[in-house]
Image (cartoon, rainbow, N blue to C red):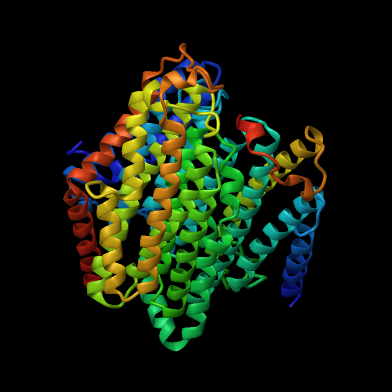
């Protein structure tokens, strides 16, 4: 239940932020949406929250085993979404600092011929 | 090559671009070594995949289980009958791109160009080889991240803003892809494509609406990536500002990765679903029309080509409808036609972009309002462009004609009359805008130009390698034109193999 609440709040806030005009809130929205997707993946794989995803001989570990596959998938997905986040951050920083573009209304393509003669 | 273990060969195909990436990155300060090294690596890659495709039958190669995990948990890599020809085309474009991208002339000047190019082809190779749905996602991301890197290599305001749009839309489609992978895993417990075919068929008997929903959801992700009708906006916004070498690779090959996944996942894995397929048909008709109408008002050669790319994606998207069609006769006819279309189209489109880049590097402009009499200034380029343009329109002896002819035949057989009509109509519009490029840019007398204010030929550019790349791609096109049966037979063989492998599984 808490999980679902978390996922939906991430999704909701992420979508709202991505749809805003400010480039920095788009950046925040991207990372929230990426994490929401990872959480959805985790939730859908039906995790047993107390169990470990590996077999162990240690006595204090519980008997039941969580499915390790979704966790491996999420690990990959987290790395990818983090790389994407870094790239979006770099691009937005470039736009903010070099070209002084703050909102998405300035992103329009005014002229093509100006660029490529 | 014959004695090599098949497992080793498949790994080598993946390893070569990765090796190229590392090698070029290690020699990042010695930029003049990049092209020779890349040529060697991509040449070897092309040789290997040609050997596998045309000399040996790819069906002899087994699947590799990575790390010897059992099938439902591990990743399988191997040649799928659908993907072998795509891999061959990837090899061809890889080699041609390395041949074409001459530092400072036709490509970017950044020393990171070649490493990222290898990264792109590494991702493409993996995506065509994999049998695992999540692994497909990972390869997609490798390809996309390399392409983002290539996009921002040279900084220009419009280029960066275009990149931002491209990244955000790709990101959204990746999210949808990831969530639908999660949903599929939750309901079937497997991500292996071979197993999913049976599992989803069984699931659709008990929960047909759920499977339909899953199919639509994952198709949405691929439709964004391949720029189908409502989601095509990112393509002209971002592809117009990159260098022609990149434009050729992206528009020719990379957007087709989305189509391939649509065919592979929605066509082969999911059971036939009439509603989704009719939606794809309508969307492909609209894609054809919108793309070609967009091309009519443009006056910049490469921008016209970009809008044509969108229009051609509409033609190719019909392949998804055919590949899962329940009627065996229509299915075979359609899939041979649409695969033929895709495979002859990829080198052609890449070549047109490359030629437009050559025009730019020789004459300093690609704007039709400034270009004049290319025919008499650069006759060889005019010949290359003319033949490619005629093939794209589909004038009878060319491979474009065979492709369009058999595609229209297949759509008529499947009783999709509106689609067939749109295909023919769009061909006329394509002809119109190609005629525009030809009459405004290529036609004209060189003597008249001295009075007008046209652009002058740059006498110092002597680049034979880019010309060789264009000629190589044109030769592939001409081979398919004069002897279309080579490709047709290969496709028919692989389709037979698909049926066979499905029957033996049952």
Looking at the image, is A112 positioned above or below residue B86? above
Residue B325: % across, % down: 32, 74
Residue B503: % across, % down: 22, 72
Front one among B366 and B271: B366
Looking at the image, is A71 positioned above or below residue A105? below
| Residue B12 visible in the current orientation | no
Residue sitting at 59 percent across and 41 percent down?
Answer: B148
Front one among B59 and B257: B257
Image quadrant containing the N terminus of chain A:
bottom right
Horizontal side, residue B306 vs residue B170: left or right: left
Label count reads: 0
Q: Residue furthest top?
A: B460
Give residue B426's quadrant in the image: bottom left
Horizontal side, residue B472 vs residue B256: left or right: left
Residue B272: % across, % down: 38, 77
| Residue B424 visible in the current orientation | yes
Horizontal side, residue B28 vs residue A114: left or right: left
Residue sitting at 17 percent across and 43 percent down?
Answer: B55
Residue sitting at 40 percent across and 23 percent down?
Answer: B37
Give residue B51's quadrant in the image: top left
Looking at the image, is B318 positioned above or below residue B291? below
Looking at the image, is B433 positioned above or below residue B65? above
Image quadrant containing the C terminus of chain A:
top right
Front one among B493 and B48: B493
Residue B198: % across, % down: 36, 75
């Amino acid at each position: 239940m808490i999980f679902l609440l978390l996922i939906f709040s991430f999704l909701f806030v992420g979508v709202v932020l991505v749809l805003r005009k400010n480039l920095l809130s788009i950046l925040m929205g991207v990372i929230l949406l990426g994490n929401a997707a990872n959480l959805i993946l985790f939730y859908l794989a039906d995790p047993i929250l107390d169990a470990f995803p590996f077999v162990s001989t240690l006595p204090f570990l519980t008997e039941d085993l969580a499915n390790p596959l979704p966790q491996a998938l999420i690990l990959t997905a987290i790395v990818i979404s983090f790389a994407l986040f870094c790239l979006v951050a770099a691009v937005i920083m470039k736009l903010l600092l070099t070209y002084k573009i703050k909102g998405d209304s300035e992103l329009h393509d005014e002229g093509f011929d100006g660029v490529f003669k | 090559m014959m004695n090599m273990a098949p497992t080793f060969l498949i790994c080598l195909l993946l390893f070569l671009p990765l090796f190229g990436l590392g090698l070029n990155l290690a020699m990042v300060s010695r930029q003049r070594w990049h092209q020779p090294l890349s040529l060697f690596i991509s040449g070897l890659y092309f040789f290997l995949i040609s050997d596998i495709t045309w000399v040996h039958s790819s069906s002899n190669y087994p699947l590799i289980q990575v790390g010897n995990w059992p099938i439902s948990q591990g990743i399988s890599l191997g040649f799928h009958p659908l993907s072998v020809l795509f891999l061959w085309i990837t090899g061809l474009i890889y080699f041609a791109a390395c041949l074409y991208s001459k530092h400072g002339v036709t490509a970017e000047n950044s020393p990171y160009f070649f490493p990222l190019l290898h990264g792109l082809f590494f991702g493409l190779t993996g995506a065509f080889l994999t049998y695992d749905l999540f692994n497909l996602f990972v390869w997609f991301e490798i390809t996309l991240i390399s392409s983002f890197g290539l996009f921002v290599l040279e900084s220009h305001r419009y280029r960066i803003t275009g990149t931002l749009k491209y990244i955000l839309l790709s990101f959204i489609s990746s999210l949808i892809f990831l969530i639908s992978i999660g949903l599929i895993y939750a309901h079937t417990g497997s991500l292996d494509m071979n197993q999913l075919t049976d599992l989803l068929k069984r699931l659709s008997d008990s929960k047909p609406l759920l499977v339909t929903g899953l199919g639509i959801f994952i198709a949405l992700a691929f439709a964004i990536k391949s720029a189908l009708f409502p989601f095509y906006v990112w393509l002209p916004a971002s592809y117009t500002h990159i260098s022609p070498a990149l434009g050729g690779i992206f528009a020719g090959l990379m957007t087709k990765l989305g189509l391939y996944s649509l065919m592979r996942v929605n066509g082969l894995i999911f059971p036939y679903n009439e509603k989704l397929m009719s939606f794809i048909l309508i969307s492909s008709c609209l894609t054809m029309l919108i793309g070609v109408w967009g091309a009519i008002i443009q006056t910049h050669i490469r921008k016209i080509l970009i809008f044509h790319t969108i229009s051609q994606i509409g033609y190719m998207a019909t392949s998804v409808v055919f590949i899962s069609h329940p009627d065996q006769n229509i299915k075979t006819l359609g899939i041979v036609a649409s695969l033929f279309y895709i495979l002859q189209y990829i080198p052609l489109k890449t070549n047109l972009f490359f030629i437009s880049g050559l025009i730019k590097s020789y004459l300093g402009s690609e704007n039709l309002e400034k270009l004049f009499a290319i025919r008499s200034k650069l006759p060889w380029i005019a010949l290359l462009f003319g033949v490619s343009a005629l093939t794209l329109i589909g004038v009878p002896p060319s491979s474009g004609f065979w492709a369009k002819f058999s595609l229209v035949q297949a759509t008529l057989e499947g009783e999709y009359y509106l689609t067939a009509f749109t295909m023919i109509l769009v061909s006329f519009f394509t002809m119109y805008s190609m005629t525009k490029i030809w009459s405004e840019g290529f036609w004209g007398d060189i003597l008249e130009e001295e009075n007008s204010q046209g652009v002058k030929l740059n006498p110092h550019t002597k680049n034979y390698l880019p010309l060789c790349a264009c000629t190589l791609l044109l030769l592939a096109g001409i081979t398919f034109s004069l002897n279309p049966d080579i490709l047709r037979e290969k496709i028919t063989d692989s389709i037979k193999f698909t049926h066979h492998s499905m029957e033996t599984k049952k």
